Amino acid sequence: MAFHLLQRNRDGAQRLAEALLAAMAGVNHCERCRNLSDIPLCAICASERRDPSVLCVVENPADVQSIEQAAAFQGKYFVLIGRLSPLDGVGPEAIGIDKLKNLLNGGEVKEVIIATGATAEGEATAHYIGEVARATGLRATRIAHGIPLGGELEYVDSTTLSHAIACRRDL
Amino acid sequence: MAFHLLQRNRDGAQRLAEALLAAMAGVNHCERCRNLSDIPLCAICASERRDPSVLCVVENPADVQSIEQAAAFQGKYFVLIGRLSPLDGVGPEAIGIDKLKNLLNGGEVKEVIIATGATAEGEATAHYIGEVARATGLRATRIAHGIPLGGELEYVDSTTLSHAIACRRDL
């Protein structure tokens, strides 16, 4: 990319540099949900068409984008920007638990959907946030794990398969 | 493979041909579960250490192998060898529903875990078998679908993500 810009597209490089500088200067975190935003309160938090009673907690801004693209959720978000990882020195304060607690105590939220990743650290984070939500008297839910849709059993890993059988649902 | 065998391993080709012939002559379907077996009643159906009250219905013999490798299930199986697909002329009789009904009416089975694939045809088959099981008064369950374990939200397809949010569980 560097060679291409230096040899063939010096104007483009100039524009790219300016865009990057503008993004670094202008994009910060939403003061309510911690998502990336170029205004103090992001468009989702400010929207009156989103249901404030359901809060979806995700690890990263990219997760918000994925869920928005799936058009599967009409509530609001809270972005941890990370996940609990004691070995790396990431504790509750680094993932904004204080801010989350304030939000949960605000009275608007009735249900917390915990959509952290299905990794060991994501599960630990989910457990921790579940405790926080329950301590505030709110309903805490976890997104479903199992066989991905469109998937054939033959190509699914053993851990997911075990989980899918253990967590089967009544039809 | 053909060139390798012809040029370098004619003995191997001979042995492969004999093994294939032996398999074609000797491997048939288990008379109870329809899985591939070289004896009339397969090892799983004949085993007294497997719980006969839980029956896992899968599409293919390869699925039995996957679940066995995951060591997640102690019951018995029923292999459809296919799935309902009216457009391809595959109806209930082609996937052995009569045999399945006999098994369910036998009195030993209490729960039917439906582990067909998460495809459109797999879901239709699951629905059909669910009806059959309920008509016999048995508990019918479906394996869990959602985000695969170890998965990050960012890399999961939209359909699975929508389903995972819609089918969230209380923590």
Image (cartoon, coloured by chain):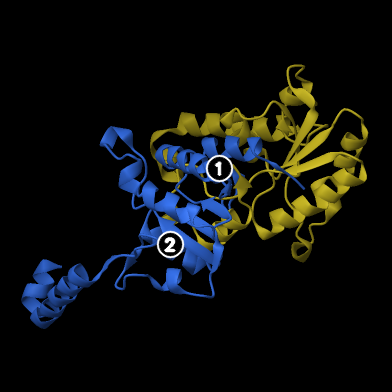
Chain colours: A yellow, B blue
Foreground residue, A30 or A17?
A30
- Residue drawn at point x = 32 percent, y = 39 percent: B91
The residue mark sitting in front, 2 or 1, is: 1
Residue B134: which numbered mark, if any? 1
**Position in image of residue B31 (x %, y %):** 34, 63
Q: Secondary structure at mark 1?
A: helix
Q: Residues within 10 Å of mark 2 (few under 14, many from 20)?
A: many
**Position in image of residue A81 (x %, y %):** 73, 45
**Chain ID of residue with mark 2:** B
**Position in image of residue A101 (x %, y %):** 89, 41
**Position in image of residue A27 (x %, y %):** 71, 32
Q: Amino acid at mark 1?
A: Arg
| In the displayed structure image, the side of residue B153 where residue A83 appears, left or right | right
Residues indicated by labels 2 and 1 sit on the same polypeptide chain: yes
Q: Can residue A10 be seen here?
A: yes
Residues under labels 2 and 1: Cα distance? 23 Å
Mark positioned earlier in the residue sequence (2 or 1):
2
Q: Is residue B16 above or below residue B100?
A: below
Q: Amino acid at mark 2?
A: Val
**Chain ID of residue with mark 1:** B
Residue under numbered circle 2: B64
- Residue drawn at point x = 64 percent, y = 39 percent: B167
Q: Is residue B168 above or below residue A25?
A: below
Q: Secondary structure at mark 2?
A: helix
| In the displayed structure image, the side of residue A139 where residue B55 appears, left or right | left
Q: Is residue B86 above or below residue A160?
A: above
| In the displayed structure image, the side of residue A87 where residue A67 appears, left or right | left
Q: Is the N terminus of chain B in the top left, top right, bottom left or bottom right quadrant?
A: bottom left
Spot the residue most to the front: B106
- Residue drawn at point x = 37 percent, y = 60 percent: B61
